[in-house]
Image (cartoon, rainbow, N blue to C red):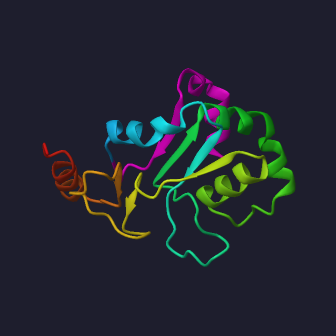
Amino acid sequence: NVWDVVVKDGRWRNHAWILKVDPDAVMIAERVRLHMAPHFGEKVYVVNCNKFPNSPNFPMMYGAVEIFAQSAMMQYAVNSWKCGQQLPWGSWGEDYYMTHCMDFIGVGRIGDFGVLGDNVCTGANCADGGIASFHPFKSEASWMQCWGQATVPR
């Protein structure tokens, strides 16, 4: 699990928010800061997709952009062993695992569906100035085109 490596490394302790961003995601850091600012100091993680609102598995955290408060990561550092031993995680993807683990160890959720515009979820409009990140842009050209649209001065 990549998060166990991050926890062991320890540099996350120097930051208020810990993010995992896929390389095919376009992230605008200042917009992420704006989305997270109201939640500074809370022990939370972000669920960023509600593609199937009537499903018991949604909303959930889509793995293109995963966001955890420092205190949430601290809770994970202390209690992740419980998830490994007490959850049926064997066939789960990493984002599904972290969603369920965070819930299991008592970390709160922020439902922020503007922190990620994801074509795998409900769509990615790179020109939307309120969205903080966009996914997936697999080619360099498509990634750069999205970055250009997202960072045009408004």
Numbered disc total: 0
On the picture, is 98 further left or further right than 122? right
On the picture, is 143 further left or further right than 27? left
Residue positioned most to the top = 14
Q: Residue at x 76, y 46 (%)?
A: 106
Q: Residue at x 25, y 57 (%)?
A: 128
| 37 and 7: which is toward the camera | 37
Location of residue 95 in the rendering, given as x and y in whole percent from the top left corner: 59, 57
| 66 and 48: which is toward the camera | 48
| 147 and 32: which is toward the camera | 32
Location of residue 4 in the rendering, given as x and y in whole percent from the top left corner: 68, 38
Residue positioned most to the left = 153
Residue positioned most to the front = 38
> From which residue to which does the magenta span run?
1-26
Location of residue 24 in the rendering, given as x and y in whole percent from the top left corner: 35, 54
Q: Is residue 124 above or below residue 71?
A: below
Q: Is residue 7 above or below residue 103?
A: above
Q: Is residue 14 magenta?
A: yes
Q: Is residue 131 magenta?
A: no
| 114 and 73: which is toward the camera | 114
Q: Residue at x 75, y 61 (%)?
A: 89
Quadrant housing the C terminus: top left
Q: Residue at x 84, y 47 (%)?
A: 82
